[in-house]
Image (cartoon, rainbow, N blue to C red):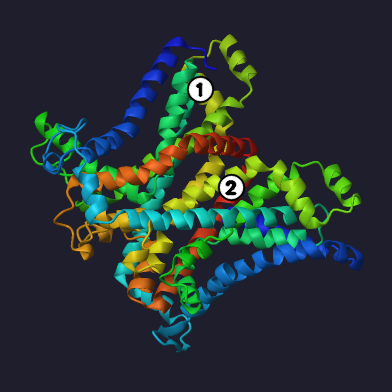
């Protein structure tokens, strides 16, 4: 746009440097994860394992039973995201109905939920979960983010793009609301369902404050909390003697794998979302 | 927070609408569908919010409320020098995160637009966006590994003779706030860059061509066209970054240790410590309400200022 060859070259160099800045610490962690226990503790620049080793991963899975929090997170993520997407699309479907009496009122409620920072209601929410006997259950983590105003509004935007004539035609044919929802609306908004789902996958996978507050039982802790105990060398696990740097790095690498596998899809939908956001602004 | 004025407008316009029984019948199934969602919001958001206000004016112990105390909890925390330190931490961290988080990404966004090699452009976008997906545990874990006393950066700096002893990035109170700001910006810069990047792409190219004919230099074009054209996007990014930074919790929680926590305990973290760890519910909720008031007044102030311009 500026049409200047020299500036374009500087831009390339700047972005290359910035990419190194993003990648270098990450690369360092991967190299540490595949080093031996001893090598990982030695001072020095570590960008390639001196001796390739999976000792760290063995400790992680055999002695620290890292698979258990991983399985818990998978459980919460799979079931939680499924329910979240379903409820968000039900909400979005209702909110997308033109001329629905009271729509402004409902929109008001949904917008209001978005304005309340979760930290402010953290303590009363803890009491609510206690009263429902949900503390120390994985169900609490599914309930905690069952549906969100953000996802409902996102789904509404997708539903609103469906031509109104299609809805009227289905109504004239005698289709009920449920039939219209499942047979007409959902199949036409697959990209929307995927976007809302991917957002929620990342949110559930990274969930931190809620499992921190709601879950005490070591059998039920989630990945991020287990990772926290290892990274912060939480002595409550009485395993700090075996947690060498390669174990810490190994845990980070294991936690990164699902994100990296999902990344191409996430990037496709998220970056599109960010572009759309900018256009609206 | 951004949306508060819109929420108010929605409620006001609802009162103007009219209801018709025939319409109500037609739409009844839709109300049945949305009701569980509204109940969910009431139970898990609005009820806890009202409780936060209610508990903040009660003397609250393990067994529940033991009476109304008015604003006593508020007086108690404002008399506490720890709490004033917490307010200072929240403001300083917020200012740092907001300032760097909203200005710095403009540079890579401008650079990205000028890169002509399409493959490189895609790769750079992919790489800088990546940390945005990482949880705070991963972010802190990555940097703690890289910056540990025997870690890569300290080792290189020592062998180059730049420093004599390792820098304790995570255990020095002078670095604590800087480390939070740095890591937050590192995490979010890719996301914000993409927003600025698409905003720059939508600028009318005629402006640049006209400037070219007038003999404008690259810097003049950036300063006089790109930046002013970015103002609307910058306002939104500023507001989102500011409100997000006020909620700083995960990074401060994870970085806290005996040596530095007094410099980085934020309001959100204070609410957690008082409410969940100490179970001092009156104090915790008073702090929560103060956070809510700060957030809402800042949001309204920023919106008012930027709307007038």
Residue at 15%, 31% in the rendered image = A50
Return the chain for callout 2. Answer: A
| Apparent side of residue B136 relative to residue A120 in the rendered image (left or right) | left
Q: Is residue B69 above or below residue A212?
A: below
Q: Quadrant of residue A165?
A: top right
| Apparent side of residue B107 relative to residue B10 in the rendered image (left or right) | left
Q: Gap between marks 1 and 2, in whole Å?
A: 29 Å
Q: Tell me where residue B238 appears, x and y as whole percent.
A: 50, 44
Residue at 22%, 65% in the rendered image = A236
Q: Is residue B105 above or below residue A211?
A: above
Residue at 73%, 51% in the rendered image = A182
Query: As rendered, which of B62 and B241 lies closer to the eye?
Result: B62
- Position of the C terminus of chain A, as image quadrant, is top right
Return the chain for callout 1. Answer: B
Q: Tell me where residue B79 appears, x and y as whole percent.
A: 34, 74
**Residue A196 disc label:** 2
SS state under label 2: helix
Q: Tell me where residue B274 appears, x and y as whole percent.
A: 35, 72
Q: Quadrant of residue A147?
A: bottom right
Q: Tell me where residue A8 appears, x and y as whole percent.
A: 44, 15
Query: As rendered, which of B52 and B224 lies closer to the eye?
Result: B52
| Apparent side of residue B123 relative to residue B86 in the rendered image (left or right) | right
Residue at 76%, 48% in the rendered image = A183
Task: Answer yes or no: is residue A238 visible.
Answer: yes
**Residue B248 disc label:** none
SS state under label 1: helix
Q: Is residue B35 above or below residue A10?
A: below
Residue picked out by circle 1: B113
Label 1 CA crowd tier, 10 Å (few <14, some 14–19, many 20+): some
Q: Quadrant of residue B59?
A: bottom left
Q: Are marks 1 and 2 in contact (CB under 8 Å)?
A: no
């Amino acid at each position: 746009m500026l049409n200047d060859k020299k500036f374009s070259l500087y831009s390339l160099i700047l972005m290359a440097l910035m990419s190194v800045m993003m990648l270098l610490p990450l690369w360092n962690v991967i190299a540490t994860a595949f080093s031996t226990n001893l090598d990982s503790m030695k001072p020095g620049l570590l960008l390639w394992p001196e001796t390739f080793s999976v000792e760290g991963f063995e400790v992680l899975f055999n002695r620290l039973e890292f698979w258990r929090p991983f399985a818990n997170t998978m459980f919460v993520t799979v079931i939680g995201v499924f329910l979240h997407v379903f409820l968000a699309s039900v909400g979005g479907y209702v909110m997308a109905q033109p001329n629905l009496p009271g729509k402004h009122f409902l929109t008001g409620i949904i917008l209001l939920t978005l304005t309340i920072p979760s930290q402010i209601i953290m303590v009363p929410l803890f009491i609510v979960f206690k009263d429902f006997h949900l503390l120390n259950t994985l169900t609490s983590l599914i309930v905690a983010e069952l549906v969100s105003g953000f996802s409902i509004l996102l789904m509404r935007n997708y539903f609103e793009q469906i031509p109104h004539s299609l809805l009227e035609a289905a109504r004239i044919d005698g289709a009920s609301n449920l039939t219209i929802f499942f047979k007409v609306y959902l199949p036409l908004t697959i990209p929307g369902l995927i976007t809302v789902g991917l957002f929620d996958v990342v949110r559930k996978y990274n969930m931190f404050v809620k499992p921190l507050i709601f879950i005490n039982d070591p059998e039920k802790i989630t990945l991020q909390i287990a990772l926290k105990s290892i990274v912060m060398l939480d002595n409550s696990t009485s395993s700090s003697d075996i947690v060498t740097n390669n174990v810490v790095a190994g845990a980070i690498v294991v936690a990164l794998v699902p994100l990296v596998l999902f990344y191409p899809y996430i990037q496709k939908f998220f970056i599109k979302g960010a572009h759309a956001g900018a256009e609206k602004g | 927070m951004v949306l508060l004025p819109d929420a108010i407008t929605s409620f006001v316009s609802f009162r103007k609408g009219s209801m018709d029984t025939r319409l109500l019948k037609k739409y009844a199934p839709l109300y049945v569908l949305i009701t569980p969602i509204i109940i969910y919001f009431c139970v898990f958001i609005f009820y806890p919010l009202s409780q936060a206000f209610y508990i903040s004016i009660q003397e609250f112990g393990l067994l529940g409320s033991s009476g109304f105390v008015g604003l006593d909890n508020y007086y108690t925390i404002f008399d506490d020098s720890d709490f004033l330190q917490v307010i200072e931490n929240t403001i300083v961290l917020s200012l740092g995160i907001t300032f760097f988080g909203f200005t710095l990404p403009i540079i890579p966004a401008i650079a990205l637009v000028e890169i002509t090699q399409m493959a490189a452009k895609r790769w750079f976008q992919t790489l800088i966006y990546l940390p945005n997906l990482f949880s705070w545990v991963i972010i802190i874990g990555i940097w703690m590994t890289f910056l540990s006393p025997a870690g890569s950066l300290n080792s290189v700096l020592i062998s180059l003779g730049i420093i004599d002893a390792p820098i304790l990035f995570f255990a020095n109170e002078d670095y604590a706030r800087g480390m939070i700001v740095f890591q937050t910006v590192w995490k979010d810069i890719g996301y914000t860059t993409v927003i600025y990047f698409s905003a720059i792409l939508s600028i009318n190219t005629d402006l640049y061509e006209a400037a070219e004919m007038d003999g404008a230099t690259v810097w003049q074009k950036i300063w006089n066209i790109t930046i002013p054209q970015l103002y609307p996007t910058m306002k939104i990014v500023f507001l989102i970054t500011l409100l997000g930074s006020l909620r700083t919790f995960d990074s401060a929680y994870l970085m806290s240790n005996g040596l530095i926590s007094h410099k980085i305990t934020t309001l959100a973290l204070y609410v957690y410590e008082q409410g969940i760890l100490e179970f001092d519910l009156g104090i915790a909720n008073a702090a929560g309400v103060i956070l809510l008031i700060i957030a809402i007044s800042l949001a309204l102030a920023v919106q008012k200022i930027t709307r007038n311009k």
